[in-house]
Image (spheres, rainbow, N blue to C red):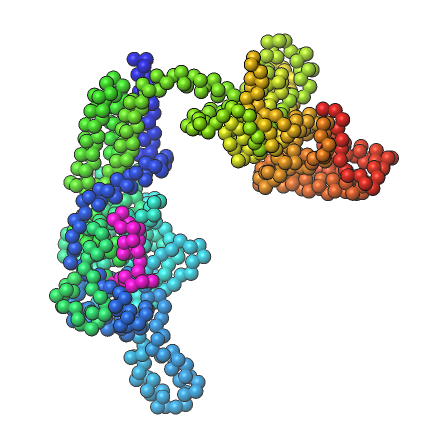
Amino acid sequence: MKKLTAPILIGLVLTALMLMHAQPVYRYQFDLVSRLDAVIYDEKLRLTMPKSEDSRLVILDIDEKSLSEHGHWPWGRDKMAHLMDQLFDHYGVRVVGFDVVFAEKDDSSGLKTLEELSKTEFRDIPKFQTALHDLKPQLDYDGRFAAALRNRNVILGYYLANAQSGRNIGVMPAPTFKTGTFDGRNIDFVQWLSHGANIATLQNAAAGAGHFIPLIDSDGLARRVPMIVEYQGQYYESLSLAIVRNVLGKNTIEPGYPEKASSDYKDMEWLSVKPETGGTMRIPVDANVASFIPFRGGARSFPYVSVTDVMTGKTPREALAGKIVIVGTTASGLVDLRATPVDRAYPGVEIHANLVMGMLDNVIKYKPVYIWGVDALLILAVGLLMSFGLPRLTPLKASFASLILLVVLLAINFTFWYSGNVIVPLAASLVLAFSIYAINMSWGYFVESRTKRQLTGLFGQYVPPELVEQMSLDPENYSMAGRKAELTVLFSDVRGFTTISEGLEPDQLATLMNEYLGAMTIVVRKHRGTLDKYIGDAIMAFWGAPVDDPHHARNATLTGLEMHVALKELNKSLVSRGWPDMKIGVGINSGPMTVGDMGSKVRQSYTVMGDAVNLGSRLESITKQYGVGFIAGESSRDLVKDEFVFRELDRVRVKGKEDPVSIYEPIGAVGEVAPEIMKELKLWSQALTAYRSQNWDQADVHLLNLTRMNPHYLYEMYSKRIGQYRLNPPGEDWDGVTTFETK
C-alpha cells in the first residue's frame, strides 16, 4: 500500500486542479485545457454539420459583377431604393436584412449643390426655384431609399466597438430592453463603448436593426454571437435575432430564467420570443447572453444571388419568392471574412444566416451556466476511479480499463450533444484521464531511475536543481573542461565575524552560520546562480556557467540586493535569541573568466578564475571603506544600467590592478526606487562632479545638503577627503582615482 500512496495522491491532486478549472466562481482556468475544449467543440461541430445547402435563406451578394455594372461601393441610394422595389414588389421576398451600414448621407445626386445655388446665384430666378422644387423628390436619394424601406420587412445592420475615443456615427435603433430591465441580476452582458449605425432617415423608416458583431475567442475564432448586448445602459439585439423576430411577425421578447432556481441563481438561460399567433420560441444563450453559431458547413452553405441580376430582373422569381434575404458582399476590399471553426476565412454574412435558420429550426447548441456541475461530476468520477483503481492493476489491465473509461466518457459527452443540443466540456476530463494514466505507467520507470535522481540531487547541492534538470536534457553540450566565458562573479562576507564568533558558544555559532549560509544560498539559487564555495563566513558564486545565462549580470545584481533583504529577516530571528545583529558586504564583477573543474587529484572544484574574479573579491572587501553593503564593478553596471539604479561611489585602483575602474552601489530596480532617493542620487552626482573638478566649495555645499537629507558615512568620508585636499591640493593632473594598497 505504501508504494501506491504517491500515485494515488498525485491523481487526487490532479483531480482537485481540474475541479478548480471547471468551476466558474474563482476563475482558476488553465489556458491549455480551455484551448483543448475549444478544439474538441470545433471537431464535434465539423463532424455533425449537415453540410448541405439551405435554400430558405438567400445571400444577396454585392459581388465583383455588381460593382462592374453599377460602379464602386457605396452606390447611390436611388439604386438601393430600386433594389428594395424589385425584392418586395417583383420577387415577393419575406424579409431583407443588411450586413452593411448606411452611416453617411448620400449627396451623389448633386441636390446639395443645387440647394446652395438656389440660395446664392439663382436666388432670384423663379424658373430655377420651380424646377428645383419639382426635382427635389427625385434627387433626394436618401428620401427615396427611406420611402422604399417604409412599411416593408427590412432590418438594417450596425456595428459596435470598444475604442475609448471612438466617434459615434449614425442613430441607434430603439433598445430591445430598456435601462433597469436586468437590475439585480448581475448578468455578464458584452458591453460596448461606441457605435457605427445608420443615418436617422433610414433607421426611422426601417422595420428594425441589429448589430452584426460576433464574439472572438482567445484563439481568434468566432464561435458565438451575443444575442443581446449592453450599450450605454440599454440593451440591443443582434441582426440575426432582429431578422427572426421580423419573420415571426408581431411578437414580444422576454428574458428566460429557470422557475425553480434558487434565489442566488441570477443567470439568464434563454430568450423567449412570443408571436401574437401563439407559441413560444426559445433561443438558448450562455453566460454572456450569446448563442453558439450552428454552422451548416463551410462557406456557401446558402445560395448566393448577384445584386445586379436582381436589379435587372435576370434572377428567376422562384429563386427569391418567400425567402429570407441577407444583403452582404464578396467583392474584394469589401468582403467581411471571419476566422471560424469551419473555415479560417468564412463570410461574415453567413454567420448571421446560420443563426437565423438555427433559431427557426431550434438547433442552436445550449451551454447554460450550471453545466459546469456536470463537468465537475465527470471529473470527480474519472479522478476517483483512476486514482484508486489504476495503481492496483497491471499495465495491461490498467490500459484496458482506461480505454473503457475513455469510451464511456466520449459516449456521455456525445449523448448530451446529439440528444439535448447541450455542450458539456470534455477537455478537463480527458486531460485528467490521460495524466493519471501516464503517471501510473511511468511511475515504475521513475522508481527504477532512483540512482540517477540521487546523482542529480547531489550535484544540485552546487547548482540550482532547475539548471541540473536543463543540463540533463542535453548532457552532450555540457563539459567540466576549462573554458573562457563572459560571466559575473559574486563575493559576500560577514562584517566583524571574529567579534561575533567570540561572543557565541561553538554550537550557537554553528547554528548561526548554518542559518545564515542557508538563507543566502536560497537567494543565490533563486536567481540561477552556481554556488562555488563557502570560505568560512564568506560566499562565492557565479552566473553564466555551466548553463549559459545571457542575463548573468542582472541575476547577480538581483541576488546581491535580495541577500540584504533576506539578512534583515534573518536578523529579526537572531536578535530575538539574544544573538548579535549581522551585516554583510557584497561585491560583484563581470568579465572574461576561466571556468571549469580545477584542483588536484585529491580534490577538485567547479570554479572560476581570472582578473575579473580577483576584482570582484576586491570590490567586496572595500564595501566597508565606503559604508555601503553592495558594490558592483563598472562592467557589471554597464550590462544592467537600463534595469537598475546605481550610485557611483568612486574611481579606484585596487591592489594588483593598474587600470582604475569606476565602482557603483546598486540601489534598486528602475521604477521601484523612491522619488526622494532619486533626488538624493541626483544631488550626489552633482557633488561627485564638483569633487572631481576640484571645486571643493561647491562639493562641500552639496555634501552638507546631502547629510541633512540623509546622513551617510559616504558623505562624511568625502568631506574628510576634501579637507585633506584643501591642505594638500592633488594638482591639475589629478585623475580623481583612489588607490588601495591593501586587499
344 inside magenta stretch: yes
Left or right: residue 243 compared with residue 743: left
Q: Viewer-proximal residue, 68 or 411?
A: 68
**Which quadrant holds the C terminus?**
top right
Q: Position of residue 409 (x, y in %)?
A: 21, 32
Residue 567: where, in percent of width, then height? 59, 24
Kindly tell me whether residue 176 is visible in this rendering.
no
Q: Give how far across and how far down residue 549 sits, in percent.
A: 52, 33
For residue 468, say whether it is visible. Answer: yes
Left or right: where 296 falls relative to 559: left
- Report the front residue among 144 and 441: 441
Residue 130 part of the magenta-drawn span: no
Q: Where 498 sits versus 565, above or below?
A: above
Q: Quadrant of residue 299?
A: bottom left
Q: Which residues are magenta?
A: 327-348
Please identify the quadrant where the N terminus is shown: top left
Q: Position of residue 245 (x, y in %)?
A: 21, 57
Determine the residue positioned at 74% across, 24% down. Answer: 742
Which quadrant of the view contains residue 11? top left
Residue found 41% across the figure and 88% down from its top:
122
Camera-nearest residue between 632 and 104: 632
Determine the main secondary structure of the stretch shown in magenta: loop
123 sits left or right of 212 in the view = right
Residue drawn at 21 percent across, 21 percent down:
397
Quarter where residue 724 is shown: top right
Residue found at x 34% / y 52%: 230
**Furthest residue in direction top, as rendered:** 506
Residue placed furthest toward the right: 727
Q: Nearer the viewer, residue 205 or 89?
A: 89
